[in-house]
Image (cartoon, rainbow, N blue to C red):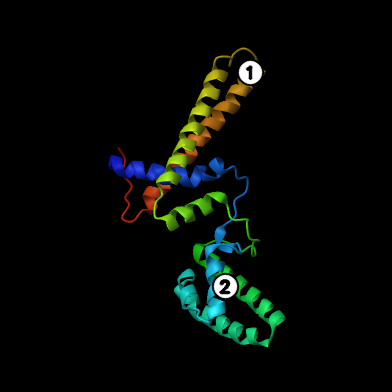
């Protein structure tokens, strides 16, 4: 694998693995099921205009007919008043997200409130909208380096006292495991990235 390709894979892996660490997230939610995520924001606009076409890109081709059918029903029901409109919209949003998640191979766990989209995902979308990922890459790159350095420094310090006592030895092992797993996680993502990249081939050097 060429050095430039490996560098790119490491960068993408770092974003995926360490984005949550950089943003201080303990539990990240998928943004496709958030009420202020891109799928549902576009769905709200589509329902208002009565045009389902912009939403079809979010669903697998074999589910397109189902979405079209449900959308047609929703548009009809929305004419029956505010309460009916709200119920119809909710049903359509849930159906759309459920089918979108199926296409991702992910389970549907219900719609999430606005504001629950992971900050890392928000930043990724903002970079895409701005047409530049440089600032985001720099921040996450710094987080990657800091994460490795911090764990390395900790395990190095613990190693100095590894034989002082059983407890000191256990502290070293804990620090070592955290350090190795951190690196291992990044390497795993790099390997997966190589396997799934367009035209990617497994190469060993």
Residue at far top of view: 164
Which element type, helix, strand or loop, lies under badge 1? Answer: helix
- The quadrant in which the C terminus is found is top left
Q: Residue 176, can we see it?
A: yes
Image point (56%, 78%), residue name: 47
Image point (40%, 46%), residue name: 134
The circle drawn on residue 133 is: none
Q: How many neighbours does mark 2 have within 10 angstroms: few (below 14), some (14-19), or many (20 or more)?
A: some
Residue 71: which quarter of the image? bottom right
Image point (49%, 37%), residue name: 143
**Position of residue 165 measured from the top left corner of the image (x, y, whole percent):** 65, 14
**Position of residue 186 measured from the top left corner of the image (x, y, whole percent):** 46, 40
Q: How many marks?
A: 2
Residue at which label 1 appears: 168
The circle drawn on residue 44 is: 2
Could you say which is closer to the camera, residue 90 or residue 10? 90
* Dot in front, 2 or 1: 2
104 above or below 50? above
């Amino acid at each position: 694998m060429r050095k430039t390709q490996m560098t790119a894979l490491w960068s993408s892996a770092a974003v995926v693995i360490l984005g949550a660490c950089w943003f201080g997230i303990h539990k990240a939610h998928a943004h496709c099921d958030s009420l202020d995520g891109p799928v549902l924001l576009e769905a709200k606009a589509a329902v208002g205009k009565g045009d389902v076409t912009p939403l079809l890109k979010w669903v697998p081709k074999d589910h397109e007919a189902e979405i079209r059918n449900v959308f047609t029903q929703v548009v009809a029901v929305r004419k029956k008043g505010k309460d009916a409109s709200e119920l119809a919209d909710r049903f359509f949003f849930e159906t759309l997200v459920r089918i979108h998640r199926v296409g991702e191979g992910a389970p549907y766990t219900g719609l999430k409130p606005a504001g629950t989209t992971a900050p890392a995902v928000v930043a990724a979308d903002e970079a895409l909208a701005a047409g530049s990922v440089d600032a985001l890459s720099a921040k996450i790159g710094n987080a990657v380096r800091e994460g490795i350095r911090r764990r390395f420094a900790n395990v190095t310090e613990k190693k100095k006292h590894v034989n002082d006592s059983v407890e000191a030895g256990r502290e070293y092992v804990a620090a070592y495991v955290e350090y190795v797993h951190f690196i291992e996680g990044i390497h795993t993502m790099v390997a997966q990235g190589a396997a799934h990249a367009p035209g990617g081939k497994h190469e060993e050097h």
